[in-house]
Amino acid sequence: MDLQQSYQTGKLLIGDIVLESGNILPNVEVAFEKSGPASGETVLVCHALTGDQFAIGTDAATGWWNGLLQPGGYIDTRRYQVITFNVLGGCNGTTSALSVNPDSGSRYAAAFPAITIRDMVLVQRLALEKLGIAHLKAVIGGSLGGMQVLEWGVMYPDFMDVLIPLAATPFVSDYAIAYNHLAKTAITSDPDWNDGYYTPDRLPAAGLGLARMVGMLTYRSDHQYNERFRRAASRRDDAAYEVESYLNYQGEKLVNRFDANCYMTLLEAMNSHDIGRGRGGWQAAARRIDAIVLTFGFSRDLLFPPEEISRFAAAVPRGRHVDVDTIYGHDGFLLEFEKWGHHIREVLEQPMKISY
């Protein structure tokens, strides 16, 4: 099948939704990417913190997960219909702090309500209804995306055959919350933050850039940093060492494509992640999951240790865990597909032949 002929992006109007907090969020829209045969089984892809709906990309070479999702790939877009939604609260077309608040006629900005991972999943479920999809072959995602995968399994246990969470634990640890606090403090300490009501000509760029630098320290391992930079002197004028220039560049790049209020919204949603909240603990919640579960942990992941992910896999009725040895740490789920992609192909093609 010609991938271009089966590729579609757009928005869906969901309408008003009731958030987990009880607040009503009106006129919710959801931006999506859809590729592959409409008659094929559907795989839902959930993106990470600063990701977006363009997992495949317009030319099958630009998406953030095109190494996994492609014709003949580990998730074969000739065989499966692949859908990705921009998360609720994101800044690529789905309702967020950038959207217009109907009560004020201006952007929500800091007035955008607090949301949770469960709210994100509810919106995705409603969006799938709009697309006429009543069942999924699989739900897959890493990091924040993996948190959504876990909630899918608990909230809608009979909606999918397979769950594939990567680099995600059943709840966010205090250690991860601490790093998120550093990132949030960096943003709110920016003199242009203005309590979240900043203007286009005075964005909290320095704070958001610093928040991204904090995040970059947790996404990769110390070994990978040391191997890559080796105390090399910077070739740019902004720092003495290459590692410093690299962090500056990553901060600048995010500032150019992401909104600070959206970043704050998603960090708070991550902090709230706990599949056991209100369900008798995470072990009890794990037992509610009916789907086959294939989890992945990546060595040297500071925020989501593989051993904690393995504990979750052992707690679900039908779970299997894969440890991936990598120098990249948490970002391993975006790289080195040849090390772990075959496990995904296998569980999709022959889920009942996986040993549990």
Image (cartoon, helix red, strand yellow):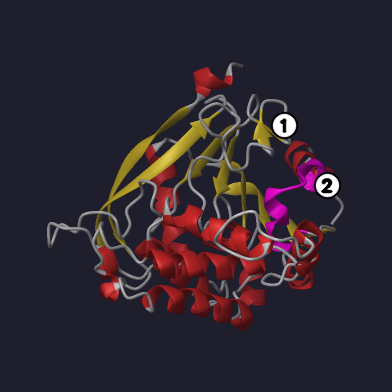
Residue at the image position 50 percent from the left and 26 percent from the top: 7
Decide which of tag 1 and tag 2 comes sooner along the chain.
Answer: 1
Boundaries of the magenta span: 328-343
Residue at the image position 48 percent from the left and 47 percent from the top: 52
Name the quadrant of the C terminus.
bottom right
Q: Is residue 336 left or right of residue 105?
A: right
Q: Residue 129: which quarter of the image?
A: top left
Residue at the image position 37 percent from the left and 74 percent from the top: 190
Is residue 329 highlighted in magenta?
yes
**Residue that carries the numbered disc 1 in the rendered image:** 73
Distance of mark 1 from mark 2, alpha carbons? Answer: 14 Å
**Residue that carries the numbered disc 2 in the rendered image:** 339
Q: Is residue 253 left or right of residue 289?
A: left
Vertical arrangement, residue 234 with respect to residue 257, above or below: below
Q: Few, some or many C-alpha atoms within 10 Å of disc 1 (few <14, some 14-19, many ≥20)?
A: some
What percent of the width, then of the height, locates residue 272? Answer: 49, 74
- Which residue occupies the foreground of this view, 239 or 208? 239
